[in-house]
Amino acid sequence: MRDEHFGISVVEGMAAGAVPLAHNSAGPAMDIVVPWHGQQTGILAVSEEEYAEGIHRLLSMPEDQYVTMQQAARSQSQKFSDAAFDSGVLDAMQTLF
């Protein structure tokens, strides 16, 4: 989805082990499908041609490279977990007290 403000479906897919092919805008481009410790976490596209190239790249990628990207995507998704959210809220509240 173009200009998705966050992209929870992308995060949920990553957490489930999918390597995302998402629109190169807003949340996915800024916060979600970004490198994790130097590893690519998915593919971003805008045009039909870029989506087709992304699909081809994912389907023809060597298994070890795909697994590395899959693991990075899953790790990146944990940045948006309930535990990470709870910790962030508690940290923010500490500054108030």
Image: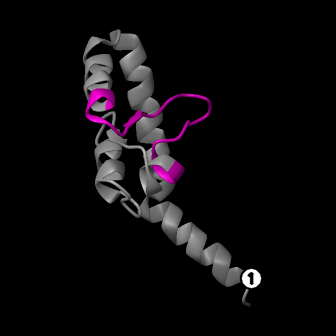
Query: Toward the viewer: 62 or 96?
Result: 62
Q: Is residue 38 above or below residue 94?
A: above
Which residue shows up at 33% across the image and 49% down it? Answer: 10
Q: Report helix, strand or loop for mark 1.
A: loop
Query: Toward the viewer: 63 or 47?
Result: 47
Magenta residues (range): 30-50
Outermost residue to the bottom:
97
Left or right: where 33 falls relative to 56: right
**Identity of the amino acid at label 1?**
Thr
Q: Which residue is mark 1?
A: 95
Is residue 9 shown in magenta?
no
Query: Toward the viewer: 31 or 81?
Result: 31
Which residue shows up at 38% across the image and 58% down it? Answer: 3
- State which quarter of the image contains the C terminus: bottom right
Q: Is residue 59 above or below residue 27?
A: above
| Displayed quadrant of residue 47 | top left
| Displayed quadrant of residue 26 | bottom left
Q: How many marks?
A: 1
Mark 1 neighbour density, 10 Å: few (under 14) some (14–19) many (20 or more): few
Residue 16 image offset from top left, x and y in percent: 28, 42
Q: Is residue 13 above or below residue 50?
A: below
Which residue shows up at 36% across the image and 51% down it? Answer: 11
Q: Is residue 48 above or below residue 53?
A: below
Left or right: where 63 falls relative to 80: left
Residue 13 image offset from top left, x and y in percent: 28, 45
Residue 90 image offset from top left, x and y in percent: 60, 76
Q: How is the image coloured?
A: one colour
| Displayed quadrant of residue 27 | bottom left
Is residue 39 shown in magenta?
yes
